[in-house]
Image: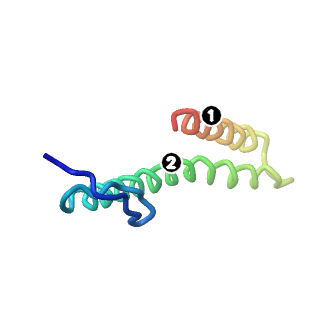
Amino acid sequence: MYCLVKVIIFSGCASPLICGSAGITDCHESSRLKTAFLNNVSHEIRTPLNAILGFSGFLNDPDLSAEKRKYFTEIVTKSSEQLLAIIANI
C-alpha cells in the first residue's frame, strides 16, 4: 500500500513523494522525456524553417535565372507546407 506524503518541486516538476523514491524517479523520467520531446520538436521545426529563410534570401538576387528562381520558390513552398504540418501535429 502506498501513502501520499507531500508534493515536492523537483527540477520544475511537481510530483507526489510516495513512501520512497518513486515520485522522484517519475519526476526524473518525466523531465528527461520532456527534454527529449522538446529537442526533437525544435529540430523538426528548425529544418524547414532554415530552408525557408535560406532560399527566400536567394530569391532577392537580381541575377538569379528564372529556372533557379522557380526551383527556389518550390523549395520555400514545400518547406512551408512541412512546417505547417509539423506545427499542426504538435
Above or below, comparing residue 35 to residue 11 in the picture: above
Which residue corresponds to the image point at 37% horizontal and 58% vertical from the top-left? Answer: 7
Above or below, comparing residue 56 to residue 75 in the picture: below
Which residue corresponds to the image point at 41% horizontal and 64% vertical from the top-left? Answer: 9
Residue 52 falls left or right of residue 6: right
Identify the secondary structure beneath mark 2.
helix
Q: How many marks?
A: 2
The residue identified by callout 1 is: 81
Tell me where residue 35 sits by quadrant.
Answer: bottom left
Please provide percent x and percent y for residue 82: 57, 37
Point out the tag, 2 or 1, that comes first from the N-terminus: 2
The residue identified by callout 2 is: 44
Indicate the amino acid at tag 2.
Glu
Please provide percent x and percent y for residue 76: 68, 42
10 Å neighbourhood of mark 2: few (<14), some, or many (≥20)? Answer: some
Viewer-side residue, 29 vs 79: 29
Residue 6 falls left or right of residue 19: right
Q: How is the image coloured?
A: rainbow
Which residue corresponds to the image point at 21% horizontal and 51% vertical from the top-left? Answer: 3
Identify the secondary structure beneath mark 1.
helix
Indicate the amino acid at tag 1.
Glu
Which residue corresponds to the image point at 39% horizontal and 55% vertical from the top-left? Answer: 36
Tell me where residue 77 sits by quadrant.
Answer: top right
Q: CA distance from mark 2 to mark 1?
A: 13 Å
Please provide percent x and percent y for residue 85: 57, 33
Residue 30 falls left or right of residue 77: left
Please provide percent x and percent y for residue 40: 44, 51
Contact, mark 2 vs mark 1 (Cβ under 8 Å): no
Check residue 27 in the rendering and tell me which mark sits there, or answer none.
Answer: none
